[in-house]
C-alpha cells in the first residue's frame, strides 16, 4: 500500500502527461513558457482571486509575500506552533520574529483565542511590531478565517494564508487561497495538487502586490530583465511543471477532489467511536492533504504505527515536533503556552489517503487499527 499513490495517478494520466512533457521539450520555452501563463490564469479563476503568480516552491511563495509587505527586523509574525517548518522559517529568514500560537485540537488550525492572547502580549511588551498572521490550512482544511479576519482587523494586521496543503478546500462557496490578503500554495508532489518536482504559487486580489511579486520572483526586475530595482529571488515555476500541472489540475477538478473526500468519509464512518477522527465544521470542506487521527498517548500512537508497518501499511507522524521545540527555534521567546500543539505532536498519526485509494485498502487500515 502507498501512503500517497503518485504512481497510480501517473498510470491513469500517462498519455496526457507524457504529451505535455514532450510538447514542452519541443517548444524550447523552458522558462516562463505559455503553460505558465495559462496555468496561472486558470488557478486564479478557480480560487476566485484576481492574480496568481507561480514560483519555485511553497516556501518561496511565503517569502515573496513577506517581501511584498517589507517584513523584517522588529516585526512580529504570528504562526501556529503546529505546522510544517517552512511556515515559521520564512519569517526568521526575513529577520522578523515568529511568535508561536497554539492550535485548535479539533481542526489542527490556529486557535483564535491563543492568537489574540499572543498579539496582546506582544503589544504589552512593546518591543516588536505586530504585522502579519500566518494562518495555515493544515492537512487540507481551511483555517477559521471568519474569526481570524476579525482579529486581523482589530489589530490592523495582514493575513498570510499558507495554503500549501489547502488547495481545493472551501469555506461556504469560497475556495482556499482566497482568504488571506495574500495566500500561497505548494505544488510539492505529495500536496493536494502536486507537480513532478518543486513548485508553488501566490494568490492575491491586490494589483500592486501582484506586480511586486512579478518583480521579486525574477531578481527584483524593473521595466525589463536586466533592470534590477530591488533585491529579489530566482523563483520561477518551470514551464514543464506548469504543463504537468495543467493535466493534473483537470483531474483534480474532474474527480480527484471528490474521490479523496469520499475516501475521508469512509475512514470517518468506519472509525467512529474507535479513535478520534478529524472534525470538519459546518460549512468547511477539506482537500485532505492528510487524514490524521489522534490517539490517547504517544505510546499508543507509536505502537499503532509499528503494528501498521508490520502489516504493510505506511503511516506518518505530521508533525512530531512543535515549532517552539525545534532546535532552530529553541531561543525564541514564547508569549503564550501551546499545550494543544505539544499534545498533538505526541498523539497524531496520518493514515494513507489519496484519490486513488480503494475501499479494500481503507478496510485493511481500519481492521489493523481495530
Ligand atoms: C509543504 C509546505 C510548505 C512548503 O512548501 P514547499 O513547496 O515544500 O516549499 C509550507 N507550508 C506548509 C504548511 C507546507 O505543508
Image (tube, helix red, strand yellow):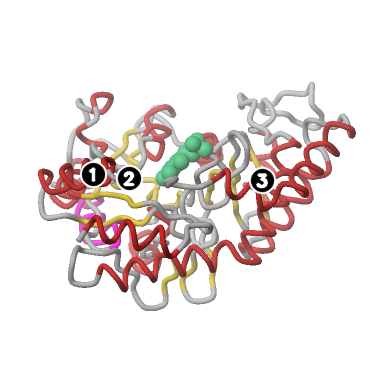
Q: Is residue 32 visible?
A: yes
What residue is rendered at 50% in x and 44% in y?
190
- Write down the residue under mark 2: 315
Contact between marks 2 and 1 (CB within 8 A): the answer is yes
Q: Is residue 70 visible?
A: no
Q: Look at the magenta stretch and give its main secondary structure.
A: helix
Q: Is residue 361 above or below residue 317?
A: below
Q: Is residue 370 left or right of residue 190?
A: left
The stretch in magenta equals 107-119
Q: Secondary structure at mark 2?
A: loop
**Could you give the CA–CA distance between mark 1 and mark 3, rounded to whole angstroms?**
39 Å
Q: Which residue is mark 3?
A: 53
Specify few, some or many for label 3: CA neighbours under 10 Å numbering under 14, 14-19, or 20 or more: many
Furthest residue toward top:
226
Kind of element beneath mark 3:
strand
Which class describes the residues within 10 Å of circle 2: few (<14), some (14-19), or many (20+)? many
Q: CA distance from mark 2 to mark 1?
A: 6 Å
Q: Is residue 358 left or right of residue 79?
A: right
Amino acid at each position: 500500500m502507498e501512503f500517497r499513490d503518485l504512481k497510480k495517478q501517473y498510470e491513469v494520466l500517462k498519455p496526457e502527461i507524457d504529451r505535455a512533457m514532450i510538447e514542452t521539450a519541443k517548444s524550447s520555452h523552458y522558462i516562463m513558457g505559455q503553460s505558465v501563463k495559462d496555468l496561472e490564469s486558470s488557478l486564479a479563476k478557480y480560487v476566485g482571486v484576481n492574480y496568481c503568480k507561480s514560483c519555485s516552491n511553497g516556501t518561496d511563495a511565503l517569502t515573496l509575500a513577506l517581501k511584498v509587505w517589507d517584513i523584517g527586523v522588529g516585526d512580529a509574525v504570528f504562526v501556529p506552533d503546529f505546522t510544517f517548518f517552512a511556515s515559521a522559517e520564512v519569517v526568521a529568514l526575513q529577520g522578523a520574529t515568529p511568535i508561536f500560537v497554539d492550535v485548535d485540537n479539533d481542526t489542527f488550525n490556529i486557535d483564535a483565542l491563543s492568537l489574540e492572547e499572543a498579539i496582546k502580549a506582544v503589544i504589552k511588551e512593546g518591543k516588536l511590531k505586530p504585522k502579519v498572521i500566518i494562518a495555515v490550512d493544515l492537512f487540507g482544511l481551511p483555517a477559521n478565517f471568519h474569526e481570524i479576519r476579525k482579529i486581523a482587523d482589530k489589530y490592523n494586521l495582514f493575513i498570510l494564508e499558507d495554503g500549501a496543503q489547502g488547495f481545493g478546500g472551501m469555506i461556504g462557496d469560497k475556495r482556499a487561497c482566497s482568504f488571506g490578503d495574500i495566500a500561497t500554495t505548494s505544488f510539492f508532489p505529495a500536496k493536494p495538487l502536486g507537480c513532478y518536482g518543486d513548485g508553488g504559487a501566490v494568490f492575491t486580489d491586490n494589483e500592486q502586490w501582484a506586480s511586486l511579486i512579478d518583480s521579486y520572483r525574477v531578481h527584483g526586475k524593473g521595466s525589463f530583465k536586466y533592470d534590477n530595482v530591488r533585491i529579489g529571488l530566482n523563483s520561477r515555476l518551470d514551464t514543464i511543471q506548469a504543463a504537468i500541472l495543467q493535466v493534473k489540475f483537470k483531474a483534480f477538478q474532474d474527480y480527484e477532489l471528490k474521490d479523496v473526500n469520499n475516501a475521508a468519509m469512509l475512514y470517518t464512518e468506519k472509525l467512529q467511536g474507535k479513535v478520534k477522527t478529524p472534525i470538519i465544521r459546518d460549512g468547511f470542506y477539506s482537500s485532505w492533504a492528510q487524514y490524521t487521527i489522534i490517539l490517547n498517548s504517544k505510546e499508543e500512537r507509536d505502537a499503532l504505527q509499528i503494528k501498521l508497518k508490520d502489516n504493510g501499511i505506511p503511516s506518518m507522524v505530521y508533525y512530531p515536533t512543535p515549532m517552539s521545540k525545534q532546535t532552530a527555534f529553541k531561543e525564541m521567546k514564547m508569549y503564550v503556552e501551546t499545550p494543544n500543539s505539544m499534545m498533538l505532536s505526541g498523539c497524531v498519526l496520518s493514515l494513507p489517503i489519496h484519490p486513488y485509494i480503494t475501499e479494500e485498502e481503507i478496510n485493511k487500515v481500519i481492521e489493523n487499527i481495530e
